[in-house]
Image (cartoon, rainbow, N blue to C red):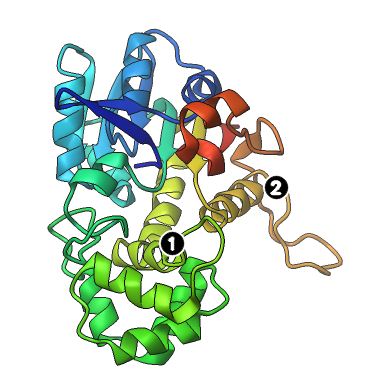
Amino acid sequence: MADRREHRGSGITAHIPVLLAESIEALRVKRGGSYIDCTVGGGGHAQAILEAGGRLVGLDADPQAIKAAQGKLKNFGRLTLVNENFGHLADVCKSLNLSIVDGILFDLGMSSLQLEVSGRGFSFMRDEPLDMRFSPQQSVTAADIVNSYSVDDLAKLIGKYGEGSRSRTIAAHIMRNRPITTSGQLAEIVARAVGRRGRIHPATQTFQALRIAVNNELDNLKIGLAQAIDLLAQRGRIAVISFHSLEDGFVKEIFRKESSECICPAGTPVCICNHEPRLKLTRRKPVQPTSEEIANNPRSRSARLRVAEKV
C-alpha cells in the first residue's frame, strides 16, 4: 500500500498509482502471465497488469483496501483478491495452488484511502483515534505503544523507524502528556517538543515510526521478499516501490545479497560461503518519478523503484 494521491469529486475517489508505466515495464507483463500485487491498495497497478493481459493475485492486509479494489476491478476476470499481509505470501499461494509466477510487485507505504478516510489515525492532518493498524485483526495499536512504552523504548523506536535525531526529546514529551488517544493530540505534542521548522510537519517521522512498529512492516517485508523470490519463475521479475530511506535501504540490501556470488564477511581471505545468487539487478540505481509525475502527484516525490530478475 503506497504513498499515492487520490482526488474526490461527486463522492468518487480517483486513484493515481505511482510509477505506473515504469512498474509495468519493469515486470514485463505479458498476456497470460501470472502476477502478484502484494499491496493491491486502490487497484491502480493491478488494473494495469490486468489490462495488459496478465492473471493476477492481489493481496492487502487492509480489508478496506480489498473492498476498494473489488469495486475498481469488478469487470475483470483472471483476478483473485485476498485480505492477507504479504508476510503470509507463501501460505496464500499454497492455498491457491499457485507455485510459480512471472512477476511480483510490492508497493510499500501508505494509501490515500488510509490517510484520508480510514479513521485510524494514520495522518496528523486530522484528529482520529490513534490506531494505525492495517488490519483490525492486529492486537497492538499506536495508542497502546505511546501509552505503555518506557521513555527509553519509545526513544529507540522513534529513532530507529522514524530516522529522527530528537527521539529522546519526543519520547519524554509523550511520557509527560499521557494518556494520548488521538492523532491530533500526538501531532501537537511532537510539534511542541521539537518546534516547527521547514515544510515537513515535525510529527512526520514519529508517525512513520509508530506505523512501522504497529504493523511490523520491516519484518513482514523481509519475510515477504524471501517468499516472493522463491515463487518467481526463471527470468521472472520482482519490483519494489518504497517511499523512505529505511525501506529503500532494506530492499537494496536484500537485492544486493541475493545477487552476489559471495556474502562472506568483509576481510574473509577466501570465499567459504558457497552462496549462489538467486537474482540479478536490472539496474543499479532505483527508478525515480519524473518531474511531470511529481507535479501531478506531489506524494510521489520520494518514491524509488528497485527491480531484480530471477536467475
The kind of residue tagged 2 is Ser
The N terminus sits in image quarter: top left
Residue 140 against residue 121 in the figure, above or below: below
State the residue at coordinates (14%, 27%): 11
> Which quadrant holds residue 77?
top left
- What's the residue at 66%, 48% (across, down)? 256
Foreground: disc 2 or disc 1: 1
Left or right, 273 with reference to 120: right
In the image, 3 versus 69, the foreground residue is: 3
Locate residue 35, reporting x and y percent. 37, 25
Residue 216 position in % (x across, y down) = 34, 63
**Amino acid type, label 1:** Thr
Residue 235 seen in the figure: no
Instruction: Work out whether 97 lies above or below 125.
Output: above
Which SS class for mark 2? loop
**Left or right: 44 in relation to 296:** left
Q: Which residue is mark 2?
A: 260
Q: Nearer the viewer, residue 294 or 98?
A: 294
The residue identified by callout 1 is 204
Kindly identify the residue that appears in the image at 45 percent across and 74 percent down.
158
Where is residue 302 shown, x and y percent of the image? 55, 44
* Category of crowding for the residue at label 2, using alpha-carbon neighbours closer than 10 angstroms: few (below 14), some (14–19), many (at least 20): some
